[in-house]
């Protein structure tokens, strides 16, 4: 019995342009004597923009590293999306304690914060927020140099993205080790969790003293 050859469909991408979006110009780091503490917030899938909006409305300073991706396909409308540089993560300062009630006083003299008219007493009630990255000692503060490195990386810079190489997806297997080769996390090691089609991979990156979930495009990583 003859076996039919599997036919691969060509990827219809004509051109992809990504433009890194700069960080807000008014981010505060405080002074040596009174530093502003920055934390890493974990969001729901594709919930970074909603989380950033809610945290800002709750009085926090927020830095959401992201870029605008424009995809041009043959005989199809142009597609524009906002994409996180580090999917499901953003930086925030001025977070209220988890177990304490927010203490912002509104115009009516009542204590608390409302998001879209709904009172909240815990940032995990904000749409898009899952948790703050923590360890046994509590919330993990992100060193200021790390935040500034991401701010510097964000540009803005426009960069063409080459079409994904199907051979790269074959090389990367679950539990395989990879190295980040692009961006502020360049040089960090990671473990592959799963592939996302032929364009990206879910990994656990060795950063912030632990293995942190992240997603990288294949052009940003290589087999270690």
Image (spheres, rainbow, N blue to C red):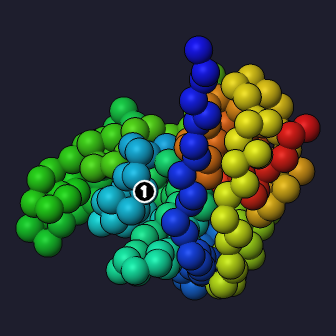
Query: Image height check: is 64 above or below 24?
Result: above
From where the camera sits, is residue 171 visible? yes
Residue at image position (61%, 21%) is 2
Image point (69%, 80%), residue name: 159
In the displayed structure, 6 sits above or below 36; it is above
Residue at horizontal 72%, vertical 54%? 165
Q: Secondary structure at mark 1?
A: helix
Is 105 positioned to the left or the right of 174 in the image? left
Q: Position of residue 125 (x, y in %)?
A: 27, 42
Q: Is residue 215 visible?
A: no
Determine which residue is flagged by label 1.
48
In this rendered view, identify the residue nearer to me: 23 or 38: 23
Measuring from the top left, give residue 103's x and y in whole percent: 30, 53
Residue 32, image quadrant? bottom right
In the image, 1 versus 121, the foreground residue is 1
Q: Nearer the viewer, residue 183 or 42?
A: 183
Position of 95 with respect to 140 (left or right) is left
Rendered-image quadrant of the C terminus: top right
């Amino acid at each position: 019995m003859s076996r039919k050859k599997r036919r691969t469909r060509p990827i219809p991408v004509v051109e992809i342009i990504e433009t890194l979006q700069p960080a807000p110009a008014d981010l505060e780091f405080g002074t040596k004597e009174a530093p502003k503490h920055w934390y890493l917030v974990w969001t729901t899938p594709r919930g970074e923009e909603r989380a950033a909006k809610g945290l800002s409305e709750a009085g926090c300073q927020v830095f959401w590293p992201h870029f605008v991706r424009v995809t041009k396909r043959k005989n199809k409308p142009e597609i524009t999306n906002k994409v996180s540089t580090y999917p499901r993560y953003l930086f925030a300062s001025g977070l209220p304690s988890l177990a304490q009630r927010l203490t912002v006083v509104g115009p009516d003299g009542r204590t608390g914060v409302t998001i879209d008219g709904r009172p909240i007493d815990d940032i995990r009630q904000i749409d898009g927020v899952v948790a703050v990255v923590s360890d046994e000692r509590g919330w993990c503060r992100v060193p200021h140099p790390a935040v500034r490195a991401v701010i510097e990386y964000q540009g803005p810079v426009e960069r063409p993205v080459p079409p994904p190489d199907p051979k790269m997806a074959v090389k990367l297997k679950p539990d395989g080790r990879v190295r980040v080769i692009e961006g502020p996390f360049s040089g960090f090691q990671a473990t592959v969790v799963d592939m996302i089609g032929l364009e990206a991979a879910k990994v656990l990156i060795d950063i912030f003293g632990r293995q942190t979930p992240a997603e990288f495009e294949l052009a940003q990583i290589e087999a270690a």
